[in-house]
Image: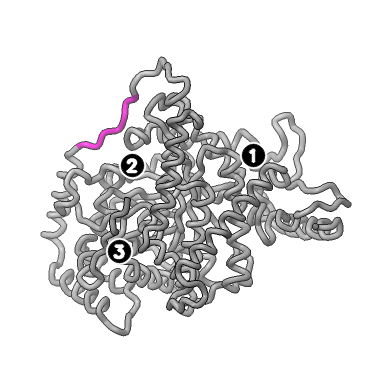
């Protein structure tokens, strides 16, 4: 039990940090004009059982947030995920988002790009530009960010399998803008574990992907210190049907695997761990989601300190982006999705998210129209500007219900970690990267992760069909006066034009330079000394080698991966 003296000492530490920090010039009062404190805790002079697990904002175990000021110091970043058609069309949408108050960009790529194919590859037929923007070479990146200074804009890229070649194209575009790439700030997803677990967009077997990710971690640590080379994603795990506790446990286990990867490369955990970030789903069960986010910070801080030896607060921080739950949106009565998204966004904010994307009401039918994208953006701005939710750090901290949920999710996650490590042989496995990595790879190979998610999805579907779970407009309150939505449709001309542009680029580039760059890349991949591949891939991107050419060259050595079917 935290006694009164310990609680008061913590309050004093928090107050000193708060007083030393910078806060926004804003009105921190209620709508009625009543002032509110920056944080609330037990009444002075009283003890509270378990308060050491709750604590104060800005100190270990960070249950209540990373910063003593909460959102009084800095609000969450509004980072809307966008991409469709070709680079010209997406560039226009980005400029609209930034002009309307967006704080950063998040790039959605089309399926061929996500799978490492060029737009003229037979596998890409009919898919170019449909679920994101088509990127074939660095020239597309030039167009995508035309008029958007990359040195001043934080950019997140949601791509994993071919993430490294796409990142190198982004670096080449920044160089062509005259930007010092060492100053770039943003996030690359690069999370290959979740691809095998849930999303299924890999290129090679796990080990080659881990080699590329290790190279990227080394390169960013040395050359681009502000850029985050990994965003460990629970979003796709949750969207595939996982429970909140499974999303949390599988995601943090993946994160521990990447920490082990960095340590196996000889990197200093206090130096590289701040470059790791996370990406979570905000689903519709309001309080469970808030508890999940709070438990995530606490678990990560404890494992980073006690298991992996992180000694600085920044190396123990779990920074995360949140996206509202696409899987919660319904095609029936789609205007209800505005309400769902607002509730989910509010849970992310009350859980202390660092940045946020709000889904558009029509995303279950098509890519967002400009109008629905604006409504999604305004949802965040109403929360930020009108509701007062940013005035107090962790306003639900100490709630009997929220704290009990937080503890329960944490305990379930810990049981899952133990099981994953045991699957890989635990501390006796002798894996060259580490015991959690060994367990993750064993779970991928055996299909354990996929089967666990499938079982959870099946249980939920059964509950839905038995009317135990309810969805308004689907199995409750199905009558409606609303008509069909006007949706965004991607013209087939987008694919034809992208293929024409790619053919023209290939005809105009220095083919000898491309061939030389790709030969150097293949030699580096095959070199037994295992040199860092990032500079070699960057040279290929500068020469206008295409995504398919770069990925295909590495694939000649790395091979492909096929998942065993299981039923």
Q: Is residue 342 magenta?
A: no
Name the residue that disc number 3 marks.
Answer: 165
Residue 225 in percent (x, y) is at 48, 68
Q: In this rendering, which labeled residue sits more in front, label 1 or label 2? A: 1
Spatial CA span between label 2 and label 3: 24 Å
First in residue order: circle 3 vs circle 1: 3
Furthest residue in direction left, as rendered: 507
Where disc 1 sits, the SS reads loop
Q: In this rendering, which labeled residue sits more in front, label 2 or label 3? A: 3
Where disc 3 sits, the SS reads helix
Q: State yes or no: discs 2 and 3 in contact (Cβ < 8 Å).
A: no
Spatial CA span between label 1 and label 2: 32 Å
Locate residue 136 relative to residue 63 in the image: left or right. Answer: left
In percent of the image, x 59 and y 66: which residue is there? 303
Label 1 environment density (alpha carbons within 10 Å; few <14, some 14–19, many ≥20)? some
First in residue order: circle 1 vs circle 2: 2
- Magenta residues span 485-491
In percent of the image, x 27 and y 45: which residue is there? 88
Residue 499 in percent (x, y) is at 15, 49
Name the residue that disc number 1 marks.
Answer: 389
Locate residue 416 relative to residue 298 in the image: left or right. Answer: left
**Is residue 95 visible in this depiction of the protein?**
yes
**In the image shown, does 159 or 408 lie closer to the viewer?**
408
Q: Principal SS element in the magenta part? A: loop
In which quarter of the view is residue 212 placed?
Answer: bottom left
Disc on res. 92 = 2
Residue 540 in percent (x, y) is at 24, 69
Spatial CA span between label 3 and label 1: 40 Å
Q: Can you say whether 123 is above or below 131 in the image?
A: below
């Amino acid at each position: 039990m935290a006694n009164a003296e310990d609680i008061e000492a913590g309050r004093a530490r928090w107050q000193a940090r708060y007083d030393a920090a910078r806060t926004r010039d804003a009105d921190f009062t209620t709508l009625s004009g009543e002032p509110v404190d920056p944080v609330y805790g037990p009444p002075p002079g009283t003890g509270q059982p378990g308060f050491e697990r709750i604590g104060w904002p800005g100190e270990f175990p960070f249950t209540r947030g990373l910063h003593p000021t909460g959102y009084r110091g800095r609000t969450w970043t509004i980072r809307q995920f966008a991409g469709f058609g070709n680079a010209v069309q997406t560039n226009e949408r980005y400029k609209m988002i930034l002009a309307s108050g967006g704080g950063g960009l998040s790039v959605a790529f089309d399926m061929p790009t996500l799978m490492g194919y060029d737009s003229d590859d037979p596998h890409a037929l009919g898919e170019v530009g449909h679920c994101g923007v088509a990127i074939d070479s660095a020239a597309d990146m030039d167009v995508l960010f035309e008029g958007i200074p990359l040195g001043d804009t934080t950019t997140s890229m949601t791509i994993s399998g071919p993430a490294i070649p796409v990142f190198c194209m982004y670096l080449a575009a920044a160089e062509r803008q005259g930007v010092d790439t060492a100053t770039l700030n943003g996030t690359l997803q690069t999370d290959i574990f979740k691809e095998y677990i849930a999303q299924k967009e890999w290129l090679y077997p796990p080990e080659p992907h881990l080699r590329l990710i290790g190279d990227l971690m080394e390169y960013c640590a040395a050359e681009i210190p502000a850029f985050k080379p990994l965003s460990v994603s629970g979003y796709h795990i949750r969207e595939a049907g996982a429970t909140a506790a499974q999303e949390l446990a599988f995601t943090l286990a993946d994160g521990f695997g990447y920490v082990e990867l960095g340590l196996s490369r000889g990197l200093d955990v206090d130096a590289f761990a701040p470059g790791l970030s996370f990406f979570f789903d905000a689903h519709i069960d309001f309080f469970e989601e808030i508890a999940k986010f709070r438990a995530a910070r606490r678990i990560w801080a404890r494992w980073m300190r006690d298991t992996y030896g992180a000694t600085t607060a920044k190396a123990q921080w779990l920074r995360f982006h949140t996206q509202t739950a696409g899987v919660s949106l319904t095609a029936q009565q789609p205007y209800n999705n505005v309400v769902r998204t607002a509730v989910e966004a509010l849970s992310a904010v009350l859980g202390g998210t660092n940045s946020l994307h709000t889904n558009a009401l029509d995303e279950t039918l098509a890519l967002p129209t400009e109008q629905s994208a604006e409504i999604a953006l305004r949802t965040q701005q109403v929360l930020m500007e009108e509701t007062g939710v940013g005035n107090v750090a962790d306003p639900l901290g100490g709630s009997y219900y929220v704290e009990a949920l937080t503890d329960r999710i944490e305990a379930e996650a810990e049981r899952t970690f133990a099981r994953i490590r045991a699957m890989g042989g635990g501390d006796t496995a002798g894996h060259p990267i580490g015991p959690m990595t060994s367990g993750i790879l064993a779970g991928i190979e055996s299909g354990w992760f996929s089967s666990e998610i499938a079982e959870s999805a099946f249980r939920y579907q059964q509950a839905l069909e038995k009317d135990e779970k309810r969805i308004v407009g689907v199995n409750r309150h199905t009558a409606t006066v609303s008509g069909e939505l006007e949706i965004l449709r991607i013209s087939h001309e987008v694919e034809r034009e992208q293929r024409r542009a790619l053919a023209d680029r290939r005809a105009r580039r220095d083919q000898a330079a491309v061939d030389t760059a790709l030969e150097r890349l293949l030699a580096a991949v095959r070199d037994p000394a295992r040199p860092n591949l990032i500079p070699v891939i960057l040279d290929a991107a500068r020469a206008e080698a295409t995504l398919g050419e770069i990925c295909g060259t590495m694939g000649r050595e790395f091979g492909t991966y096929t998942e065993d079917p299981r039923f």
